[in-house]
Amino acid sequence: MDQKLRLPLEGLTVLDFSQFLAGPSAALRLGDLGARVIKVERPDGGDASRGLYLADLAFDQDSALFHAINRGKQSLTADLKNANDLALVKGLIARADVLIHNFRPGIMDRLGLGWGDVAAINPRLVYAGVSGYGPEGPWRDRPGQDLLVQSLSGIAWLSGDGDGPPVPAGLSITDMMAGAQLAQGILALLVRRGVTGEGGHVDVSLIETAIDLQFEHLAAYLNRDAAMPPRSNIANANLYLAAPYGIYPTADGHLAIAMAPVDRLGALIGCDGLGQFPADSWFAERDAIKALLRRHLAGQATAHWLSILEPAGIWAAPVLDWPAFTAEAGFAALGAVQKVRSPEGETLSLTRCPIRVDGHIIRCDQSAPRLGADNASIHSELTGAA
């Protein structure tokens, strides 16, 4: 991190009771913006994602995934069913600015840490919860897991060609977006607290996030369609966009083409058959148009087509995998990768915070904490404060 930069959340303390991805990612972003984040974990194993290995990749006693979501935080172990540990946690709550949890609805209340309980301890606290399906309704106690939410919400039917099965996004998109929504809500309440002096309670859920992710398509469906709109059978990429929108094979790879006038596109690339389609047919005849494009574009390499389309202002791009993407000069110019260090000096490459503040890139070279690594220092702080 640039030492000249004063981060906007410096001086704030966040208690992160959450685990896995959505809640911890919100806490991570607040930490990137300068907050001190104390991860409150159960003594017997801590956050379950410590043992959630992707590609069998480990770092400093835990999974690399855990470090990606929890870098730069501190760790305090506490058994919330133990009276002494609960008293310690309440002492932290009295001094904190934000509390984040992702327990199922009702559990924090049973532990004596519901919104009403903590507001009595610290009325300035911003209390943030993330759940799978919200506090009410028949789904409230279902497991809030990203693939399940994508499947329930219709997202999985947005991808894949029309004659194929549903295809989920290859990333945990509802988890990550729920974390982003939670961070927005927290920041909004912190702004309000700066005006009124009072804290507040913010909640998000994965299912409501999934609905919001689809706001464009659902706006059309709710006001026009009586059934699920069909996916294009060829190069499907958006239910409601006309040809040529999609990804096409070329002689040596794939080419993405976004919105473009079909007749002009045909003239540029020498695909005369596209000229037979009037503008008012570009959606209704999208499969026929895409079939012509698919055959024509397969005849030349991706770079050949880009050399024609990009100077003409047509929105097109190569379809890159990670080796190709990370080898690009554009990727290098972003400085998107940072190194974090373990206590022994080992390093792990992770992505950085995507936000720039006052023109500065935000970096963090501290790995995620070992379980309970900060017990002694935090206990000492509370004892000294008492």
Image (cartoon, rainbow, N blue to C red):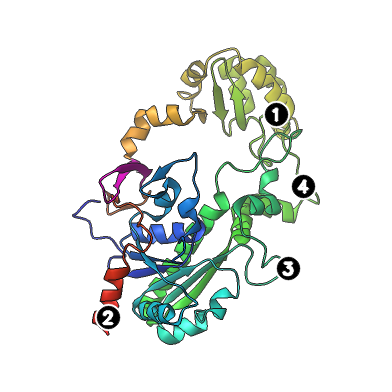
Q: Which residue is mark 1?
A: 234
Q: Which residue is mark 3?
A: 138
Q: Of the residues shown, which amino acid type is indicated by label 1? A: Ile
Magenta part of the chain: 336-352
* Furthest residue in direction bottom, as rendered: 120
Q: Of the residues shown, which amino acid type is indicated by label 4? A: Met
**Disc nearer the start of the sequence (3/1):** 3
Residue 35 sits in which quadrant? bottom left
The answer to whether residue 273 is magenta is no
Using a 10 Å C-alpha cutoff, classify the residue at mark 4 as few (fewer than 14 neighbours), some (14 to 19) or many (20 or more): few
**Disc nearer the start of the sequence (2/1):** 1
Q: Which mark is residue 383?
A: 2
Using a 10 Å C-alpha cutoff, classify the residue at mark 2 as few (fewer than 14 neighbours), some (14 to 19) or many (20 or more): few
Q: Position of residue 221 (x, y in %)?
A: 73, 52
Q: Report helix, strand or loop for mark 2.
A: helix
* Furthest residue in direction front, as rendered: 44
**Disc nearer the start of the sequence (1/4):** 4
Q: Residue at x 54, y 54 (%)?
A: 175
**Disc nearer the start of the sequence (2/3):** 3
For the residues labelled 3 and 1, say whether their Cβ atoms are less than 8 Å apart: no
